[in-house]
Amino acid sequence: MDGNGRWARSRMLPRYVGHREGVKTVRRVVEACTERNIAALTLFAFSSENWRRPSDEVSLILNLFVTTLKKEVAVLDSNGVRLRFIGDRAAFSGKLRELIDESEARTRDNARMELVIAANYGGHWDITQACKAIVRRAVAGELDPDTITPQVMAAEMSLADLPPPDLFIRTGGERRISNFLLWQLAYTELYFTEVLWPAFGTGELDDALLWYANRQRRFGRTGEQVEQLKGA
């Protein structure tokens, strides 16, 4: 969700106004995804690298987390959305960690859509914590290192219980994935748009979904094989 600060600067507004508008876009996109029967949506809300930003901006973003969670969790719950967080929570305040725990517990049994918030998350961190878990199992004698496969690794990653993402959307004009779900995006279709996140609406979402619908997903097969499978 890129471009909050640039959206604000282009309007001669402080960056924090862009972040507030970005929260409105989150609400709009989540609602649109539930209406379109999308099973899971993961939002990259705060990366492990975002701590490098000015301290006042970081504080604002974290405060937005708190106020947004307090305001939105009841709405998500009433709409059947399960909320969960991935990332290293240790750096967050006790108040924020408590709110995260409470929101996850409140929505745990919802099944209409899975909304995942990646906060203090990075793909390198994700892979590293999976490796640590596997090493601990090997040291304990629970796992033979020779039996470690990509499937064993995948089982220790964040979102191991969900299918890999079908579609990645990045707003704001950048053409990179910036340490987001590095393992999980191996076969994901990558869609980049110049639209800044606060201006991203249902029309832009539908443009991305239409683009995705016209992609041929081969997973190593030839195009002819894919067409044959579709006709089988």
Image (cartoon, grey):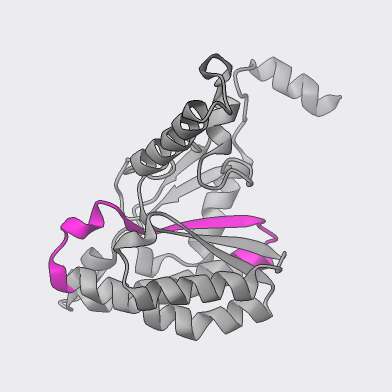
Which residue occupies 46% across, 78% down? 69
Q: Residue at x 16, y 56 (%)?
A: 52
Q: Residue 70, percent across and down?
A: 46, 84
| Magenta stretch: includes residue 50 | yes
**Farthest right residue in view:** 232
Residue situated furthest front in the rendering: 140
In terms of depth relative to the viewer, which is nearer, 26 or 72?
72
Name the residue located 70 percent from the left edge and 16 percent from the top edge: 224
Instruction: Return the x and y of residue 166 as percentages of the image width and height.
Output: 58, 42
Counting from the top left corner in percent of width and height, residue 193 is at 39, 51
Residue at 39% of width from left, 83% of height from top? 67
Q: Is 131 located above or below residue 84 in the figure?
A: above
Query: Quick check: can you spot residue 21?
Result: no
Which quadrant: the N terminus?
bottom left
Residue in front for this viewpoint, 187 or 53: 53
- Viewer-nearest residue: 181 or 167: 181
The region drawn magenta spans 33-56
Say left or right for 52 vs 69.
left
Q: Is residue 100 left or right of residue 96?
A: right
Q: Can residue 176 be seen?
A: yes
Q: Nearer the viewer, residue 30 or 181?
A: 181
